[in-house]
Image (cartoon, rainbow, N blue to C red):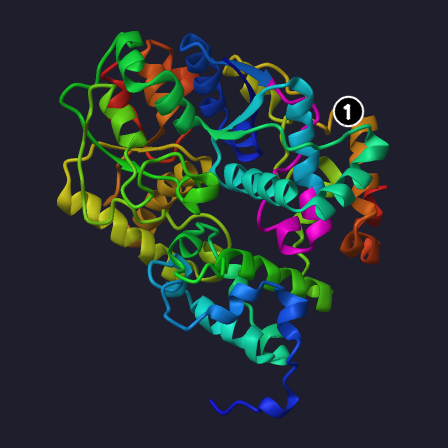
């Protein structure tokens, strides 16, 4: 593949992942070895993502879905010889993508905003009772607390800029 | 000792029998569990940590502040919750500016995070606080002669300087020693330390490749060991290693994989004499072959 560097953004790394260790990456590929998602289709190749950020390939990075296939095992962070913290890099790329293109924003946040959790925690009362479990002091059962939690989230940048996603929950 | 029990979402919502096993076994071993009233999502890596820094660490701060208020460390079973809470604690502890911003966000709720609480995984508490010897003394029934394998939760191993409690993250022993304390024989095999493959986006973005990844591990278990059970200590490993066997069987049109999967505390609870209908009631792959021994 031929890459056009004339359109590259040399300061991209500062926007995406302001960590100087990133520049110590020498492309060894240790982050790929043993990475479950490196078997994916398309494969997650963390080293390539690091290169894209360093070289400032903004458009390519914005269109790349592979950071989202990471299993979060963080093995790459243990093994990276240059302390690039590849898992933190992946989360940073996802954050940058979400900020640049709202269609990347994970829908799970709508569930967390509406009930505090990704799963309907505490609603399976019959099953819980049959197992001898007590009712949980979830935030869903405490409207005042849930309101405060939502208000806190709404003061954070991406939430407030995309508040239309949560209109049904007010 | 008293510990705040951080439940996460999958355990109480989908696998409450694991919660039941933990609530019965831990106090019997001297670990009192305190509920975290008003806790929220850890936050899951696929949610706020993939969206922006402020919502991520404000949510971590919310949960950590609840435990600080109680004055106890946090105990977690779910690997992702454990790792996410650790990431929150690490960043909020090291980055004063971030901590100040998060405390601004927490203030209207009357909360503050000071980073005084520790986050501990349940297998760490069992191995390093209770200890295999005490567990062996406390159990009524043993799994003598039964072979099993352990699935280590990646999130408890890496990065070891932040989350670790093993002497070597490359060769962890806690879950193995804990399982041996129940009388079982833990078999070694070539892919012993391979990730289950279940967390994050991989299984959703590349289902065929993800199936093949875990199939390789299951085949290694069958071909290289005498395992009659798989023991895990993470809700994702539990649900995934169990569910994928059923999925692969359906794809093949025959029953190839039928190794029952247990959370460690479920096996422990059974060995301590608790009722299987309460502590090991929910699974895709039937557990009768093991349950009938109790």
Does the magenta portion include B51?
Answer: yes
Write down the quadrant of residue B127 in the picture: top left
- Locate residue B99, reporting x and y percent: 72, 42
Residue occupying image coordinates x 82% and y 46%: A154
Q: Up-down: is B273 above or below B168?
A: above
Residue occupying image coordinates x 78% and y 32%: A146
- Locate residue B267, reporting x and y percent: 32, 21
Residue at the disc numbered 1: A142
Residue span colored magenta: B35-57
Residue B164 lies left or right of residue B10; in this view the side is left
Residue B27 lies left or right of residue B118; in this view the side is left
A112 or A126: which is nearer to us?
A112
Element class at badge 1: loop
Q: Up-down: is B148 above or below A134?
A: below
**Would you say the magenta stretch is mainly helix, strand or loop?**
loop
Chain letter of disc 1 in the image: A
Residue A150 lies left or right of residue B234; in this view the side is right
Q: Quadrant of the C terminus of chain B?
A: top left
């Amino acid at each position: 593949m031929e890459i056009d560097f004339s359109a590259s953004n040399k300061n991209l790394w500062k926007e995406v992942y302001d960590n100087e260790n990133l520049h110590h990456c020498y492309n060894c590929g240790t982050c790929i070895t043993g990475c479950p998602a490196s078997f994916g289709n398309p494969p997650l190749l963390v080293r390539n993502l690091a290169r894209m950020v360093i070289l400032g390939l903004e458009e390519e990075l914005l269109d790349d879905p592979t950071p989202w296939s990471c299993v979060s095992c963080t093995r790459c962070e243990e093994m990276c010889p240059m302390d690039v913290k590849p898992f933190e890099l992946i989360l940073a790329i996802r954050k940058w993508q979400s900020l640049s293109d709202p269609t990347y924003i994970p829908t799970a946040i709508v569930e967390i905003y509406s009930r505090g959790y990704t799963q309907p925690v505490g609603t399976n009362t019959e099953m819980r009772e049959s197992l001898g479990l007590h009712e949980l002091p979830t935030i869903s059962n405490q409207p005042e607390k849930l309101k405060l939690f939502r208000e806190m989230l709404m003061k954070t940048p991406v939430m407030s800029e995309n508040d239309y996603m949560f209109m049904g929950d007010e | 000792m008293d510990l705040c029990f951080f439940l996460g979402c999958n355990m109480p919502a989908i696998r409450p029998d694991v919660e039941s096993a933990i609530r019965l076994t831990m106090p019997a071993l001297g670990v009192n569990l305190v509920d975290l009233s008003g806790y929220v999502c850890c936050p899951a890596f696929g949610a706020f940590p993939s969206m922006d820094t402020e919502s991520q660490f404000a949510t971590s701060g919310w949960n950590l502040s609840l435990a600080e208020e109680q004055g106890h460390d946090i105990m977690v079973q779910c690997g992702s919750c454990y790792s996410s809470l650790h990431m929150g604690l690490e960043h909020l502890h090291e980055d004063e500016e971030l901590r100040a911003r998060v405390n601004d966000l927490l203030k209207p709720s009357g909360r503050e995070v000071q980073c005084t609480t520790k986050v501990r995984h349940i297998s760490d508490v069992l191995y390093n606080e209770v200890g295999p010897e005490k567990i062996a003394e406390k159990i009524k029934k043993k799994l003598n002669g039964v072979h099993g394998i352990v699935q280590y939760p990646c999130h408890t191993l890496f990065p070891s300087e932040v989350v670790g409690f093993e002497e070597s993250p490359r060769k962890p022993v806690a879950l193995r020693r804990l399982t041996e304390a129940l009388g079982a024989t833990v078999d070694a095999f070539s892919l012993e330390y391979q990730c289950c493959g279940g967390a994050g986006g991989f299984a959703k973005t590349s289902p065929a490749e993800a199936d093949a990844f875990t199939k390789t591990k299951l085949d290694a278990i069958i071909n290289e060991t005498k395992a009659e059970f798989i023991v895990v200590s993470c809700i994702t490993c539990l649900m995934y290693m169990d569910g994928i066997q059923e999925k692969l069987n359906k794809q093949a049109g025959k029953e190839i994989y039928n190794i029952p999967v247990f959370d460690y505390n479920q096996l422990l609870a059974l060995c301590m004499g608790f009722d299987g209908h309460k502590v090991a009631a929910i699974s895709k792959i039937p557990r009768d072959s093991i349950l009938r021994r109790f």
